[in-house]
Amino acid sequence: MPLDPEYPAERLAFIAEDSGIELLLTQHHLRASLPVADGLSVVELDRLDVAQHASTNPEVALHGENIAYVIYTSGSTGRPKGAANRHQALNNRLQWMQDAYHLTTDDVVLQKTPFSFGVSVWEFFWPLMQGGQLVVAPPGAHREPAQLVELIRTHNITTLHFVPSMLQAFLAHGEIEACTSLTRLMCSGEALPAELQNQVFTRLPHTWLYNLYGPTEAAIDVTHWTCQDDGRNQVAIGQPIAGIRTYVLDGDLSLASRGNSISAALGWRVAICTALI
């Protein structure tokens, strides 16, 4: 369970207490800023002497229903709440992503999302699982378009993620045409405006743009769409990823009829329920 040191101390204290963590892994320079309750075991990784420990992997019995991670969201009321995801759900999500987008050993993924957000999970694990290269951006780089352009050019980044608002800031930078190595651009976290999609097509014509949707509670993403230069004024959220069923509901939380589902997805007040098959 990640604790972002940039969070306010009050939020960190609430998460630590609400989650009931028993072991905190941190670094020495961060410890003073983190709320450490009495009885909480703390390991400072940068001062840990591992010389006397076994070098083999521990034999830990795991199955798909075990919790893989917990990430705290702001919650609908603004009060943080923990979203727990299972190994089975995470594996399904990562395997689908590979089947859909075919990462190779020649690809380079830029990990720039703060690890307190679900997107960071695939940024870390997808390239490592497929033998691709993982480049970890410096803290705060996701907010600096000029720094991102430099990282993309220096490391020949092929794959990265933006929330649409940050993609807009990135496209406002005058040198993004120089990012010729970029072949996959993933968007999620917010609605993707058609105008923004079209800017990508114009300024990064060699780059595929993908619109993903999913809440933290559902292991990152549950639907996907390959963006198309088809003249439409809205970008679809697409179809369910592998192993997932989605249900489009109307404003009364009733299942929308098949003929009305597209209208609902384009304009109605809807809820999308998901279930792992």
Image (cartoon, rainbow, N blue to C red):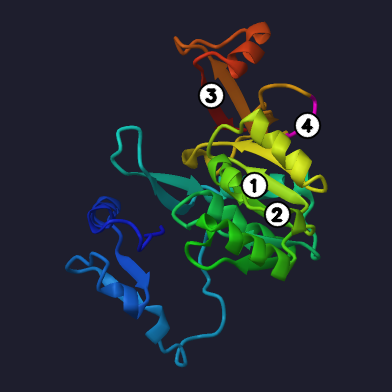
* Circles 1 and 2: CB atoms closer than 8 Å: yes
Image-quadrant location for residue 156: bottom right
| Residue drawn at 67 percent across, 29 percent down | 194
65 in relation to 141, above or below = above
Indicate which disc, 1 or 3, sits on the residue closer to the N terminus.
1
Residue 59: % across, % down:
53, 71
Q: Nearer the viewer, mark 4 or mark 2?
A: 2
Residue 157 visible within the image: yes
Indicate which disc, 3 or 2, sits on the residue closer to the N terminus.
2
Q: Tag 1: residue type?
A: Leu
The residues bearing labels 3 and 4 have C-alpha atoms spaced at a distance of 23 Å
Q: Tag 3: residue type?
A: Ile
For mark 3, give the secondary structure. Answer: strand
Mark 4 — residue? Answer: 228
Q: Is residue 274 left or right of residue 82?
A: right
Q: Is residue 253 left or right of residue 131?
A: left
Mark 3 — residue? Answer: 272
SS majority, magenta: loop
The residues bearing labels 1 and 2 have C-alpha atoms spaced at a distance of 7 Å
Image-quadrant location for residue 36: bottom left
Magenta-colored span: 226-230
For mark 2, give the secondary structure. Answer: helix
| Residue drawn at 58 percent across, 20 percent down | 247
| Residue drawn at 33 percent across, 80 percent down | 28
In the rendered structure, find residue 171 and report the number of the disc placed on it: 1
Mark 2 — residue? Answer: 176
Outermost residue on the front side: it is 174
Q: Nearer the viewer, mark 1 or mark 3?
A: 1
Residue 243 visible within the image: no
Residue 4: % across, % down:
38, 60
* Circles 1 and 4: CB atoms closer than 8 Å: no
